[in-house]
């Protein structure tokens, strides 16, 4: 039996499986989501599903993949239904119906623009990853970015999320249709502000009055998102299909914990998210910092240090006492205290709970998946902590070790001719310093990449020396003995 609208009634008879409680067939699309990958399907789509379960509303989602047709083609065979498997102390299955349509922008740009411009579309949400914002080191839109340059020349058939959003807003303005809200759901600090900058800069390239209209009419709330969502593997497909008694070709797995904190800066309607656990607050900044600096910084640290030591998953490496102690020390001594947490957050318990989440044996979260796109992720997760600690006269020794693990991870991949999944992979390959055996040369090579480090950190001799010491310790020692390396450096 294949999961589909037809077979949904059979599944609804199984009390262990939650199915949509609203009238799915008569629910219209009110949200367009750009980038309907696993995280969207595990997080925002689930909150929207739960909101429609309790309060209805026309908040069906049109997912727009910018390039890949996989999600559209697989989900079409199951009427865009899929299973969310919550893998934790208890295992739960929920069939999600919130996604009503999936389009592929590279093949269906007209339909995408029509959907975005429709009056019924009240909200555009995005998970386009750090690299999708196309901002330069100065925080402004990088108009030389190949996708942006292309879009400015082909505004009706854009490639980037920014190009689509602005073209749709322009069409709405021309047809006197109210603007939509735009909500970024990426792990990017100040994600709403960054997106706003990119959208307004792009609009200004086309037409100043459009830019002014966007500025006056579009809300770009900042938001913090959290839920550990490893990518779907073949074994997930088999296990979930067996558990629900129907073939689901693309289920999504995640942990029980989930959090969404959104800045209460909104124009017009929204789904009843506040009734299903979404927190609306005037200040998201503290939540964002806590999440990026604790969960994501520790995740990336484990991804690079753990991969160098031969571990495969977050669970495996965190279960090793030396790595467990390392990330606890990093969190307690260098991360906590680098920022002002929100008043309502006990940051020590928050940090402990995060490390507990890494020890969920049901979740096989590959370090290799977290290691992707380090040049973009570390700018959000590690460098701001280093900058703040340097400013506050706090230690950066363990943060430098974490960064040095990334350097070594890249250097090894270059030496072993392995593929590097990173938008700067070509730049790394062309930097001969990164293949050098001279550690100072390697460190200077990395620090010279301005799009990552800017032009301030490179001048900091304390940081440079710590990076040299950390990288030497890593090359001389055994990464699996991370405790010995930490002891040597501290
Ligand atoms: C991870 C995140 O892949 C990664 O880089 O650190 O996706 C992490 O699992 C989520 O931010 C958790 O909310």
Image (cartoon, rainbow, N blue to C red):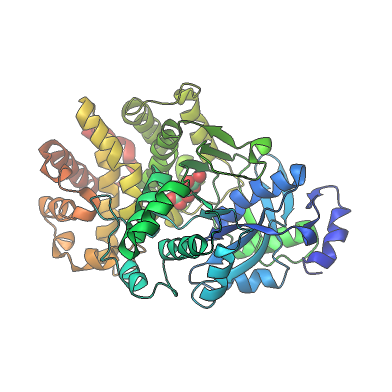
Residue 49: % across, % down? 70, 50
In this rendering, position of residue 248 left or right of residue 385: right
Q: Quadrant of residue 296?
A: top left
For residue 5, above or below residue 380: below
Q: Quadrant of the C terminus?
A: top left
Residue that extends furthest to the bottom in the rendered view of this protein = 107
Residue 463: % across, % down? 17, 39
The residue closer to the viewer here, 61 or 258, is: 61
Q: Residue at x 26, y 68 (%)?
A: 426
Q: Quadrant of residue 25?
A: bottom right
In this rendering, position of residue 287 left or right of residue 96: left
Q: Residue at x 54, y 53 (%)?
A: 180
Total marks shown come to: 0
The residue closer to the viewer here, 245 or 200, is: 200
Is residue 30 shown to the viewer in this render? Answer: yes
Residue 280: % across, % down? 55, 34
In this rendering, position of residue 117 left or right of residue 466: right
Is residue 133 shown to the viewer in this render? Answer: no
Q: Quadrant of residue 437?
A: bottom left
Residue 192: % across, % down? 43, 46
């Amino acid at each position: 039996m294949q999961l589909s609208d037809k077979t949904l009634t059979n599944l609804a008879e199984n009390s262990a499986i939650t199915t949509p409680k609203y009238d799915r067939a008569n629910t219209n699309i009110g949200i367009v989501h750009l980038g309907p990958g696993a995280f969207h399907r595990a997080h925002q789509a689930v909150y929207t599903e739960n909101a429609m379960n309790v309060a209805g509303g026309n908040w069906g989602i049109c997912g727009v993949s910018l390039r890949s047709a996989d999600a559209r083609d697989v989900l079409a065979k199951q009427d865009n239904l899929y299973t969310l498997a919550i893998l934790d102390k208890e295992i739960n299955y929920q069939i999600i119906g919130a996604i009503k349509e999936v389009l592929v922008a590279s093949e269906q740009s007209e339909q995408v623009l029509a959907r975005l411009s429709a009056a019924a579309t009240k909200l555009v949400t995005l998970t386009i990853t750090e690299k999708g914002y196309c901002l330069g080191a100065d925080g402004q839109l990088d108009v030389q970015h190949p996708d942006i340059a292309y879009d400015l020349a082909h505004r009706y058939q854009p490639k980037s999320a920014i190009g689509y959003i602005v073209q749709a807003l322009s069409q709405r303005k021309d047809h006197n249709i109210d603007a939509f809200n735009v909500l970024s759901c990426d792990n990017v600090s100040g994600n709403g502000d960054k997106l706003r900058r990119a959208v307004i800069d792009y609009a200004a390239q086309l037409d100043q009055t459009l830019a002014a209209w966007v500025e006056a009419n579009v809300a770009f709330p900042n938001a913090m998102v959290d839920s550990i969502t490893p990518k779907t593997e073949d074994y997930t497909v088999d296990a979930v299909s067996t558990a629900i008694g129907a073939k689901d070709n693309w289920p999504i797995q995640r942990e029980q914990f989930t959090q969404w904190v959104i800045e209460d800066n909104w124009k017009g309607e929204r789904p009843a998210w506040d009734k299903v656990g979404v927190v609306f607050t005037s200040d998201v900044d503290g939540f964002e910092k806590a999440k990026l600096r604790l969960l994501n910084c520790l995740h990336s640290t484990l991804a690079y240090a753990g991969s160098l030591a031969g571990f495969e998953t977050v669970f495996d490496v965190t279960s090793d006492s030396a790595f467990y102690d390392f990330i606890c020390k990093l969190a307690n001594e260098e991360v906590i205290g680098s920022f002002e947490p929100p008043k309502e957050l006990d940051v020590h318990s928050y940090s402990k709970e995060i490390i507990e989440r890494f020890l969920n044996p049901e979740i096989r979260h590959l370090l290799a998946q977290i290691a992707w796109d380090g040049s973009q992720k570390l700018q959000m997760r590690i460098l701001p902590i280093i900058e703040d600690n340097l400013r506050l006269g706090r230690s950066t020794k363990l943060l430098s070790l974490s960064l040095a693990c990334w350097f070594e991870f890249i250097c090894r991949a270059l030496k072993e001719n392995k593929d590097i999944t990173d938008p700067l992979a070509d730049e790394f390959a062309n930097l001969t310093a990164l293949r050098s055996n001279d550690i100072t040369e390697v460190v200077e090579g990395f620090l010279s990449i301005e799009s990552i480090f800017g032009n301030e950190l490179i001048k900091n001799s304390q940081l440079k020396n710590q990076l040299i010491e950390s990288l030497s310790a890593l090359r001389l020692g055994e990464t699996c003995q991370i405790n010995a390396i930490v002891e040597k450096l501290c």
